[in-house]
Image: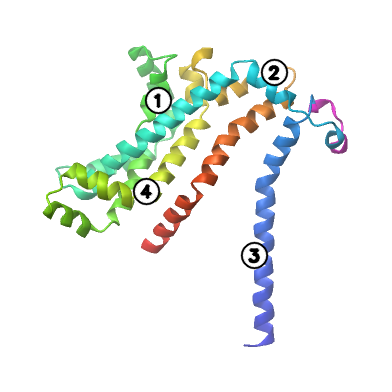
Amino acid sequence: MSIGSTWMRAFRHKLAVAALLLGAVAMIFPLLWMLLLSLKLYPQRFSSLWELIQAPVTVQNYRDIWISDNFARYFANSFLVAGTTAVGNVLLCTLSAYALARKTFVGKRWVFASVLLVMMVPPHVLMIPLYRLMVAFHWLNTYWALIVPWLITPFGIFLMKQYIDQLPMELEDAARLDGASEWQILWRIVFPLSKPMLVVLGLYVFLSQWNAFLFPFLFASDLAHRTLPVGLAFYFGKQSIDWGHLMAGAALSALPVLLLLLFFQRHIVQAMIAGALKE
């Protein structure tokens, strides 16, 4: 190996490390900025970054938003909506995907094609039809409107179908020879083997619904059913923005997401590695 090729390989390695560090800084900086603003009283009154950094640190913004403005209720609503839709997708999408992957029935290809077609439809196109449907069902300002339309998603069906297709059918055939029913095969073979992808699907749906703004804003206008993104939007005033309380609320809303990603990171990595190996 020549000196030139060794030098070039070392240069590429350093360049890749520098690019990764730059990307990490770009991703972490908004979180640090949010945390800095949330720990300062009225940060908008400071004219420079140095003055902002020197200002005393306080958790008063966190106390204010948790006690006032029903923030705890918004937090609980978001947990209920995001958690229920995540569990619903894990169960219903897996059942639908198992039928498409393992069963033979008339129109199977058309059903799967319809799932792919629905994935291509922008969600904003459904805004008016869904709103009229919620009005017809008398579901406005109820948890039904925030949960039921998203209990099963075409992306979840597609994701699980592609994963189940790669599972060895020999295990299922052996279970059938032992007298196992379809439900037993699902609960004891398919679900355990699909655990990494189920975690990814659950986290994806949870994050999507946790950060959803448009449909919760349309379907729940009362305080009792308002979710976190909608509640945080009201910190934007017509003349000014309450940056301290807004950033404190954003930090609290980001905390569960960060904890979930840290707790399930091993399953996410397993799903990514499994997908790469099966390709």
Crowding at dot 3, Cα within 10 Å, few <14 / some 14-19 / many 20+, comes out as few
Q: CA distance from mark 3 to mark 4?
A: 33 Å
In the image, 62 versus 52, the foreground residue is: 62
Q: Quadrant of the C terminus?
A: bottom left
Residue under numbered circle 1: 147
Q: CA distance from mark 4 to mark 2?
A: 44 Å
- Numbered disc in front, either 2 or 1: 1
Q: Secondary structure at mark 4?
A: helix
Type of the residue with mark 2: Gly
Q: Which portion, as a residue range, is magenta?
A: 43-51
Type of the residue with mark 4: Lys
Which label's residue is closer to the chain start, 2 or 1? 1
Q: Residue 72: where, in percent of width, then height?
A: 57, 21
- Numbered disc in front, either 4 or 2: 4
Write the residue at 24% across / 49% down.
101
Write the residue at 61% across / 23% down.
233
Q: Secondary structure at mark 3?
A: helix
Q: Could you say which disc has been placed on residue 237 in the image?
A: 2
The relative height of residue 88 versus residue 72 in the rendered view (above or below) is below
Residue under numbered circle 4: 195
Type of the residue with mark 3: Ala
How many marks overall? 4
Q: Could you say which disc has been placed on residue 16 in the image?
A: 3
Crowding at dot 4, Cα within 10 Å, few <14 / some 14-19 / many 20+, comes out as some
Which label's residue is closer to the chain start, 1 or 4? 1
In the image, 40 versus 188, the foreground residue is: 188
Q: CA distance from mark 1 to mark 3?
A: 43 Å
